[in-house]
Image (spheres, rainbow, N blue to C red):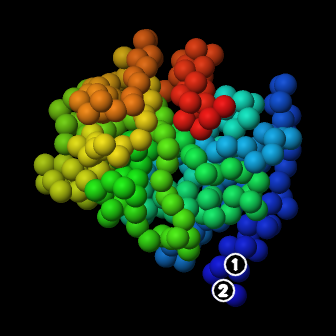
Amino acid sequence: MSSSLRYLVLGCLALMSTSTMAQSNYSLTTQADIPYARVDGNDLLLDLYKPAGVESPRLLVWVHGGAWRTMTRKSRPTESIVEAFVPAGYAVASVEFRQSTEARFPAQIHDIKAAIRFLRAREQDLGINAERIVAMGNSSGGHLVAVLAVSNSDSPLQELQGDVGEYGAYSSDVQGVVSYYGGSNLTTILTQSTPHGLSVREPALDLLIGGQPDVQVDLARLASPALHVSESSVPLLLLHGDQDPQMPINQSHEMHAAYKALGLDVAFEVVHGAAHGGALFHDAERNRVVLQFIARILGD
């Protein structure tokens, strides 16, 4: 069986297994375990959540955190993202990627871009509108979507496009990015970190880039979106807690400053009293800020 046919068969099986579940005052359909590419003999999967009864909803792509090495596309706060934005009429694709225990950067970006190309290529089959996409992520996932923000097809970072998947003719561009307490500059992150942050970040960087940033200088710079902001960078919304003990809030300050220096479209929501994640990032006030950003980027 050809790989193209294999994707079609597996995709159809995922569609057939679609389930509908009630969530308070709304319902959604879940299409789980959809294969979007195959790397080293393994399928890369995504889950798709759609508002029931909405024809071709516009698309949000969610990238999970976990220090680039743990958690999954089903881990929290995926549920919080789905509960916040599916009732507003958006589809959410939660994307799996090779973790740093499997491959070094930029494999993660290559995979996520492959997922975006797949979603555009198969939008009619999947029942979504993937013409314009907002990418969202938390923690290390926030870092990865910030990389997406500065690496569209018209950016200087063409080495981040990759060749994963079978849909190279389709665009991997996103039109907006929301980073929840994500990193932005691996060359400064350690000097900004608390002792607790260092205990998480140093071993995580050893896996992600194969060493510490002062040793793996070139790869650390390539993986630092704050160093690659350009006129082609897409609109960006940053959310970060001012009590974050793990991901320094200065990482979001750096990204914000790089955008502001070029007069680009950026907003920074400091979540006062918040640490690294938690309910404050998904309360009514913050969800309203994010929804306003999404609506502006994707259209009403």
How many C-alpha atoms fall within 10 Å of the one at disc 1: few (<14), some, or many (≥20)? few
Identify the image quadrant of residue 284: top right
Say the numbered circle drawn on residue 2: 2
Q: Is residue 127 left or right of residue 221?
A: right
**Residue at image location 80% in from the left, 67% down from the top:** 13
Q: Is residue 33 left or right of residue 283?
A: right
Rendering coords of residue 137 (x, y %): 49, 40
Residue in front for this viewpoint, 203 or 249:
249
Which residue is outermost to the left? 214
Rendering coords of residue 88 (x, y %): 72, 30
Rendering coords of residue 96 (x, y %): 56, 55
- The Cα atoms of the two marked residues, 1 and 2, are separated by 6 Å
Rendering coords of residue 282 (x, y %): 58, 23
Q: Is residue 138 left or right of residue 26?
A: left
Residue in front for this viewpoint, 13 or 51:
51
Give the position of the N terminus as an image quadrant.
bottom right
Residue in front for this viewpoint, 176 or 286:
176
**Residue at image location 44% in from the left, 71% down from the top:** 163
**Residue at image location 56% in from the left, 74% down from the top:** 166
Residue 43: tell me if it is visible: yes
To which residue does mark 1 refer? Answer: 6
Amino acid of disc 2: Ser
Amino acid of disc 1: Arg
Give the position of the C terminus as an image quadrant.
top right
Residue 276: tell me if it is visible: no
